[in-house]
Amino acid sequence: MRRKNYEPAEEYSADAYAVGGWGKGIAWYVLGWETEPDEDTEWSGIEERTGNLICVMVGDDKQFSIDPSDVTEIDPESFCRECGQIGCGCCVYS
Ligand SMILES: [Zn+2]
């Protein structure tokens, strides 16, 4: 599968987020705003934002395109940086 393209999303600077529809037990990282080539990209080199965010589950690298209204910031001390589970205490930064 082609890696998704994205550009930095300064609005999403928190350590981690929860994503609606994926259960409350998993923490996610927001990588940036998803971009896609349009008909001009071949000569302009510029891709257009789709309006979605590219997110990965903590501990995984599979990228998902997520509607920003489903993304909410979570407490950076509430999740495990290894397995990504909210409530797991094995690798929590504080
Ligand atoms: Zn864990």
Image (tube, helix red, strand yellow):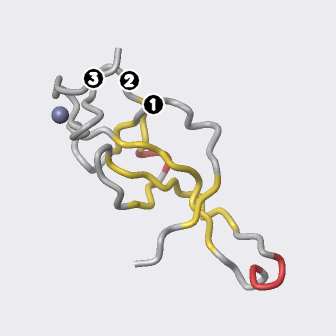
Pointer 2 local density, CA inside 10 Å: few below 14, some 14–19, many at least 20 = some
Q: Secondary structure at mark 1?
A: loop
Q: Give me the C-alpha separation between circle 3 and circle 2.
A: 8 Å
Q: Read off the residue under disc 1.
A: 15
Task: Tell me the quarter of the image containing the C terminus.
Answer: top left
Position of residue 15 relative to residue 64, above or below, is above
Disc sitting over residue 76 in the figure: 2
Horizontally, residue 12 falls left or right of residue 45, namely left
The answer to whether mark 2 is within 8 Å of ligand 1 is no
Horizontally, residue 32 falls left or right of residue 60, namely right
Q: Read off the residue under disc 3.
A: 92
Residue 9 place in picture, x, y as percent: 62, 45
Task: Tell me the quarter of the image containing the N terminus.
Answer: bottom left
In the displayed image of the protein, which residue is found farthest to the right?
Answer: 44
Amino acid type indicated by mark 1:
Asp
Q: Give me the C-alpha separation between circle 2 and circle 1.
A: 6 Å
Instruction: Examine the image and state in which quarter residue 44 appears.
Output: bottom right
Sequence-earlier tag: 3 or 2? 2
Instruction: Examine the image and state in which quarter residue 70 appears.
Output: top left
Asked if labels 2 and 3 touch by Cβ distance under 8 angstroms, the answer is no
Nearer to the camera, 68 or 62: 62
Amino acid type indicated by mark 2:
Pro
